[in-house]
Amino acid sequence: MRIAAIIVAGGSGARAGGEIPKQYRSLLGLPVIGWSARAFAASGVTEIVVACAPEHRDFCRDATAEIANLRIVDGGATRTASVRAALAAVGDADAVLIHDAARPGLSPSLIHALVAELEAGAAAVAPALSVPDTLRRADASGRIVDDVARDGVMRMQTPQAFRADTLRAAYAALAADASMTDDIAVVRAHGVEAKLIEGDAKLMKITYPEDMAMLERMLGGDRITCVGHGVDAHRFGDGEFVTLCGVRIPHSKGLVGHSDADAGWHALVDAILGALGEGDIGAHFPPSDPQWKGADSERFLRHAAKLAERAGARIVHVDVTLLCERPKIGPHRDAMRARTAEVLGLPLNRVSVKATTTERMGFLGREEGLAAQATATVERPA
Ligand code: MG
C-alpha cells in the first residue's frame, strides 16, 4: 500500500507578527512539526505534503529540511481549504493520513495501527480517546444549563487515515467554501462509515502555553536540572557609558574589553554554558578573533540560548549580580531584566538582575573596574 501523509500546519490568514507559531517552536531540540514528519518518515510513508501559511514558509522549510520526500504547499483560509490544497499535491497513493502539526507525540506504532485498519478494509479510521471527566453544558456566565451524557463520547485525534479514492471523492463532493474541524467529518458528510481506534494521550494538541512543558515531560524521557555559574570582570577606561545586561548607561568612564565589555551578560553566557557543559565564552568567541571586536554581547547570549535549544534543554531561571560602586544600577535594573528576558525568550519572573557594592573594598571599591556573577538553572536530558 502506497501511503501519503498530509501535515496541516496552518493556512493563510493565520495570525501574523514576529512570534514563531507553535508548530515551528523547538520541543526538546526539534521543531514541533519535525516530530510528526520524522514519525511518518520512519513509518514507510512514501510522500509527505505540508500545508503551511505562505508567510511561514521559511519556518516550515527550516523545520523539515532533513526529511526526504517532503513538499510544502500554501494552505488556504480554513483547515478544510488547506487539506484540499495538500490533497491536490499528493501523487499516486492508496492511502492518505492527515495530521495536525500541533500534535508532535505521533508514534510509528499508531501509524501502523491505522494503516492496518485500512488494509483490513476500512475506508476511514481515526484515533480517539474516551472522556474521563463528567460533562456539563454551561452558558456564558458559567451557569449550568444541562448535564451531558458522556457514554460513547470520544475525543478525536489525528492522524486520520483514509483510502485515497474515498477521501478524494468526499472532498470533490464538498462545497468549495465548506469548513469542517476534521476530515472524518468530511467523509461522513459524503456518507462514508468511519472507524475509531484507541488514541494516545501523547497525541495531545498544543493549545495552551503550558502544553509545551507537559509534552517535554511526556516525550523527553529522564530530565535533570543543572545549575551553571559564571563570573566576569572588566576594567574601567575612557568613555562616556557602560553597557550592562544589554542596557547602555551614561557614566564618566567606559569599560575596556574586546567586545562591548558587558560583564553582566558575559557572566550569564558562562553560566548557561556551564549548565550545558559547553566550556566557556572564550572558547566560543576567542578574543583573538577580530570578528568579535566591539561585538554586541547580545550575539553571545543568543548563541548560548541556541546551544541550549539544540541540546533539548530549557533555561528555567537566570540570576545576574552586578558588583560595582558606580554607576548606580538601581535605576536601570528593570530595563536590564526586561532586555535579558527578551533575548532569552523567558517570562520576566524567571529573570533576576540585582546589584551590590563591596563597601569600597578591593579593586571594585577603588573603582578600577566592575564585575558580575550569574547563575543559570537549566533543565536538560539526563
Ligand atoms: Mg567579559
Image (cartoon, helix red, strand yellow):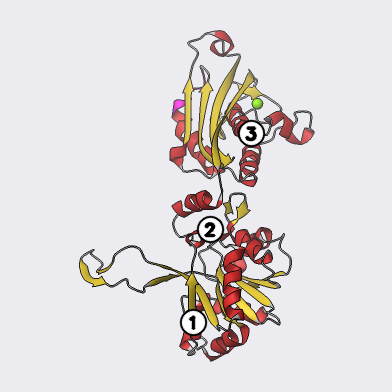
Percent coordinates x, y for residue 223 in the rendering:
55, 42
- Res 133 → quadrant: bottom left
Q: Report the amino acid beneath label 2.
A: Lys
Numbered disc in front, either 1 or 2: 1
Percent coordinates x, y for residue 215 in the rendering:
51, 53
Percent coordinates x, y for residue 38 in the rendering:
66, 61
Whether residue 250 can be seen here = no
Q: What secondary structure characterizes most of the magenta part? A: loop
Q: Nearer the viewer, residue 17 or 162?
A: 162
Above or below residue 253? Residue 117 is below
Which residue carries the number 1 mark?
194
Of the numbered discs 3 and 1, the one sitting upstream in the chain is 1
Which residue carries the number 3 mark?
273
Q: Residue at x 49, y 83 (%)?
A: 186
Looking at the rendered structure, the number of numbered marks drawn on it comes to: 3
Tell me the CA gap for discs 3 and 1.
Answer: 52 Å
- Res 165 → quadrant: bottom right
Q: Residue at x 63, y 80 (%)?
A: 95
- Element at badge 1? loop
Return the residue found at the far front: 120
Which class describes the residues within 10 Å of circle 3: few (<14), some (14-19), or many (20+)? many
